[in-house]
Image (spheres, grey):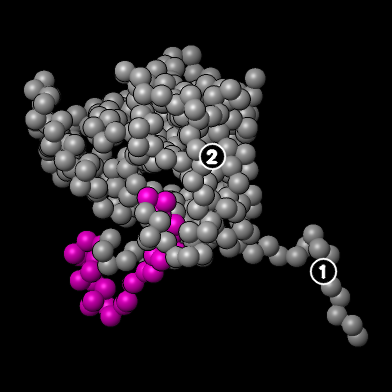
Amino acid sequence: MLAQTAPSDQVPRVDHFRPIEKYYRRRGDGHKNSKQRRRERHQNTDGGVDYSDVIDVHCLERNTEAQRIRIRRVPLSPHATSIPGAILSPKHAEMFEIDGLPGLCILINAMPRSTQVEWAFRAVREYSQNPFTNVSNLTKERDATKNMWKHAWKEPCEASWKAFHALRWANVGRHYDWTEREYLDTPDMPPLPLELEQLVHEVFEMTGMLATCKAAESGIVNFYPAGTMMGGHLDNAEDDMVNPIVSLSLGTQCIYLQGGLTRETPPTPLWLYSGDIVIMAGEARRSFHGVPLVTSILPDEFSNAMDELAASNTMMDPREFRAFREYIASARVNVNLRRVRSD
């Protein structure tokens, strides 16, 4: 008797995203604290991870020949000019695309180090206090994070720091309800901060997308202590699935996975550093992506910029800035901005 073949629409789909995500979650020895290293030595587990497949657009020499072939430098817009008061500067900026990842652009060296520090500090001390966060989402108390950062640095104790480290995301602009997976029109919700609107405007101008793109309306600020991750997902709750998402990395470096329209497509791993800006347009806007690994590797230039800011800003409470330095030394802040309405 001949075996019956299942119809093509019933063929089991294979998830190729998850195995790669799990692989990079196996942190290499250089990304573990001393307690984790001691435990693995005691258990005789290897734990080593090969990062040679992770694309690094910052240094082409770190890539294999096969990776270098995929990396393509693309010119910035001729309208990208340095102006006083701008957030970004095209002076040292470069933009890259990766073959096989249509719609994905990576803009590097566009945000000065001093600006990166200022923006990371603002995210920790201001955006973290917004009324809509993962903490308030769980507690149902909109004031749950209002003074969380203040308590962490002004009344330092293990409980205060543990509470702040539980923060994973905060909404800015239009509120996204993670339980219902929809945007809410909350009457008292403040608009997207002007500096975030300006950032998106400058990114679109620098990359030549300004003429076809609309202003951002909502943002999610992610707080990733080293060792945490964001599982592979789609950003598909917005009515507008055409306008690009602009994603700014600040703090420690991470591995970012960019996949395809389904989880059947194996994702491409890329290193992202502080100041890198990922633009997800076209197919990339509708594709799976995630962050399986956040390291505790902070660029020396970022640390130097913190020294300079601390020395030059006499109005800042030194205790607060020391607390910020302690936090960002092993954490990544990620600001994601997008359009919600399709009109």
Tag 2 secondary structure: strand
Q: What percent of the width, then of the height, locates residue 27?
A: 34, 64
Residue in view at x 20 percent, y 65 percent? 35
Q: Which residue is mark 1?
A: 6
Q: What percent of the width, then of the height, locates residue 20?
A: 49, 63
Q: Main secondary structure of the magenta part?
A: loop
Please report whichever mark, 2 or 1, sits nearer to the chain's N-terminal start.
1
Question: With respect to residue 120, does 328 lie above or below?
Answer: below
Q: Residues within 10 Å of mark 2 (few under 14, many from 20)?
A: many
Tag 1 secondary structure: loop
Q: Which residues are magenta?
A: 32-58
Residue in view at x 20 percent, y 47 percent? 300
Question: With respect to residue 225, does 129 lie above or below?
Answer: above
Mark-to-mark CA distance, 2 and 1:
37 Å
Q: The residue under label 1 is which amino acid type? A: Ala
Q: Which residue is mark 2?
A: 280
Residue in view at x 45 percent, y 26 percent? 80
Q: What percent of the width, then of the height, locates residue 291?
A: 43, 51
Quadrant of the drawing holding the C terminus: top right
Q: What percent of the width, then of the height, locates residue 134?
A: 39, 37
Q: What numbered label is drawn on residue 119?
A: none
